[in-house]
Image (cartoon, rainbow, N blue to C red):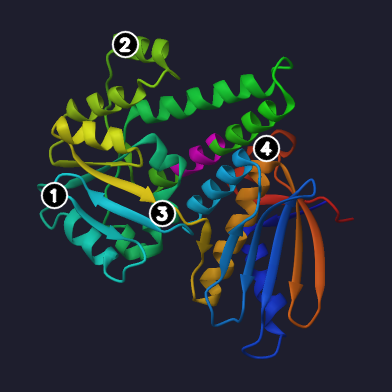
């Protein structure tokens, strides 16, 4: 069985289009799960931006595919500073300059800390969106991770694991739980990515009574208030900016005196990849890996304008092959010798 890394998939996709007539290297990739189409990628030429169409009719599958697009930075977002009601969209040319000028402090004695909510981590907006600004710019950002965000992701994993193994649940309910279980594991990759880039825990010492209270309320919709309380009681000097994708949480945080950025996804179900061919293929390879880990097994059908076609089956089971494959972004080609 052959294992493919994300970089190997990217190189494969680049080589597949390298021998097509110049300027006419149209590429189409469709990914299916047990004959149910998940998404389709189309690129008219090496000089055009690629687009991803979300294909499932099933609502749960559609949402899962859109979350995959989120994690590779292919969805168009609006970023709103709740306090001053100013919004920038990520398809605007100046959004990166706006973000850096407002949320990176030139004064080292008064740093600005970006504090991600659980949903911001789950959607991988740090690595999938902010890192696209470039490594040098991304290094300027300072992140502090709330302990309750880590605990909430762990609690989500345990709930979905239990549900996916519960034989009393319907088959489609167990499948949905299995996908969400995979998404929480992917979220841990985002946590480790941020820590590797210098992020620290927001609070080094937490009251055991608060931990006990959180454990009793996990999964009941109260985690947001614990996270906001941790931000308010942090002893770090500097400004904290809360990053969340939950509107009510954003409004509540602002009312409590916490500077907040609200990240909202557009209603479009079209994923837009980079117009730069190398970056486009990198995002496409990321989407293939992400989809394989979320759905377990997928079939990839590739076709080029020359008529050349190829079908490959991939699997991304963390249970079968272990966490090293998940964290190294490796998936298995199931139909290889």
Q: Which residue is mark 4?
A: 318
Cα gap from disc 2 to disc 3, whole angstroms: 40 Å
Among numbered discs 2 and 3, the one appearing first in the sequence: 2
Is there a contact, CB below 8 Å, between mark 3 and mark 1? no
Report the magenta stretch's main SS.
helix
Mark 4: few/some/many CA within 10 Å (<14, 14-19, 20+): some
Cα gap from disc 1 to disc 4, whole angstroms: 44 Å
Q: SS class of the residue under badge 1?
A: loop
Residue in front for this viewpoint, 319 or 296: 296
Residue 96 vs 87, above or below: the answer is: below
Q: Residue at x 39, y 35 (%)?
A: 118
Q: SS class of the residue under badge 3?
A: loop
Among numbered discs 3 and 1, the one appearing first in the sequence: 1
User: Residue 239: x percent and y percent?
Assistant: 15, 42
User: Residue 130: x percent and y percent?
Assistant: 36, 57
Residue 84's disc is 1
Cα gap from disc 4 to disc 2, whole angstroms: 32 Å
Q: Is residue 303 visible?
A: yes
Mark 3: few/some/many CA within 10 Å (<14, 14-19, 20+): few
Q: Along the horizontal axis of the image, is 279 left or right of 305?
A: left
User: Residue 286: x percent and y percent?
Assistant: 58, 57
Q: Which residues are magenta?
A: 184-191
Front label number (4 vs 3): 3
Cα gap from disc 4 to disc 3, whole angstroms: 31 Å
Among numbered discs 4 and 2, the one appearing first in the sequence: 2
Front label number (1 vs 4): 1
Front label number (3 vs 1): 3
Q: Is residue 329 visible?
A: no
Q: State the image quarter where residue 88 is shown.
A: bottom left
Q: Which residue is mark 2?
A: 208
Q: Which residue is mark 3?
A: 266
Front label number (1 vs 2): 1
């Amino acid at each position: 069985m052959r294992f493919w890394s994300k970089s190997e998939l990217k190189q494969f996709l680049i080589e597949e289009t390298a021998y097509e007539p110049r300027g006419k290297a149209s590429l189409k990739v469709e990914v299916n799960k047990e004959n149910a189409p998940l998404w389709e990628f189309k690129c008219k030429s090496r000089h055009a931006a690629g687009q991803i169409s979300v294909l499932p009719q099933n609502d749960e599958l559609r949402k899962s595919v859109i979350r995959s697009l989120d994690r590779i930075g292919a969805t168009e977002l609006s970023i709103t500073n709740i306090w001053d009601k100013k919004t920038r969209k990520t398809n605007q040319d100046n959004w990166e300059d706006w973000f850096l000028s407002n949320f990176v402090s030139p004064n080292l004695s008064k740093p600005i800390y970006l504090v991600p909510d659980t949903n911001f981590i789950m959607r991988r907006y740090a690595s999938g969106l902010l890192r696209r600004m470039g490594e040098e710019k991304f290094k300027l950002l300072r992140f502090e991770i709330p302990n309750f965000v880590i605990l909430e992701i762990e609690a989500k994993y345990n709930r979905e694991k239990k549900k996916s193994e519960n034989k009393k649940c319907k088959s489609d309910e167990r499948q949905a739980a299995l996908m969400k279980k995979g998404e929480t594991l992917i979220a841990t990759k985002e946590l480790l990515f941020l820590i590797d880039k210098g992020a620290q825990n927001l609070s080094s010492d937490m009251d055991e009574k608060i931990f006990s209270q959180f454990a009793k309320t996990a999964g009941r919709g109260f985690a947001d208030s614990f996270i906001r309380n941790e931000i308010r009681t942090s002893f770090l000097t500097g400004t904290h900016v809360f990053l969340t994708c939950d509107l009510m949480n954003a409004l509540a945080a602002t009312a409590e005196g916490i500077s907040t950025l609200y990240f909202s996804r557009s209603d479009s179900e079209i994923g837009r990849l980079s117009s730069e061919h190398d970056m486009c293929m990198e995002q496409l390879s990321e989407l293939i890996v992400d989809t394989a880990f979320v759905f377990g097994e997928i079939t990839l059908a590739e076709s080029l304008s020359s008529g050349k076609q190829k079908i490959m089956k991939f699997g991304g089971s963390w249970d079968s092959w272990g966490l090293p494959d998940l964290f190294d972004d490796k998936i298995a080609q199931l139909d290889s010798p």
